[in-house]
Amino acid sequence: MAIADAEVSALMRALPESLRDKLAKVSVTFRRRPQGDDVVEDGDEYDLLGLFVGVSLCENDDTDPGLSPEIRLFLDNIRDEADGDETAFRREVRDTLLHEIGHYLGLDENGVELRGL
């Protein structure tokens, strides 16, 4: 988990300040693998690398905050994807985090993929 935490911190520091400000309310948590509550939509699988839950930035409504925005990274699945290679693991953590940040910003799966995330 220390490697993943270091990658998340480094990525967040590298983002433009305006984006870091927008992400201030988003928590990033680590889980080993998805649990029952992580499979929230048809098609979600237990081999997910990450998941965004909560209210996205474009849905933000101060009168009804809903769920606090959270990005969950599933470290065992990311490690499996990286096939035990530490460099690949670091890259997968960063790529997955960027992908889930895209969802927080309001992009659907197609929008995230079009941006290479």
Image (cartoon, helix red, strand yellow):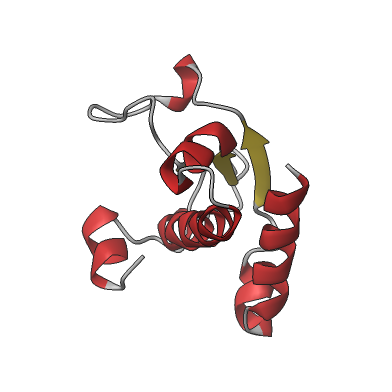
Against 49, is 32 above or below?
A: above
Q: Residue 1 location, x and y as percent?
A: 73, 42
Question: Residue at image x 43%, y 59%?
Answer: 99
Question: Residue at image x 59%, y 47%?
Answer: 63
Q: How many marks?
A: 0
- Front-most of 64 and 95? 95
Q: Residue 15 location, x and y as percent?
A: 63, 78
Q: Is 100 left or right of 41, judged from the image as shown?
A: right
- Front-most of 33 and 114? 33
Q: Is 40 left or right of 68, judged from the image as shown?
A: left
Rendered-image quadrant of the C terminus: bottom left
Q: Quadrant of residue 90?
A: bottom right
Q: Is 5 left or right of 115, judged from the image as shown?
A: right
Q: Residue 112 location, x and y as percent?
A: 31, 63
Q: Can residue 64 be seen?
A: no
Question: Residue at image x 47%, y 48%?
Answer: 82
Against 95, is 39 above or below?
A: above
Question: Residue at image x 38%, y 30%?
Answer: 47
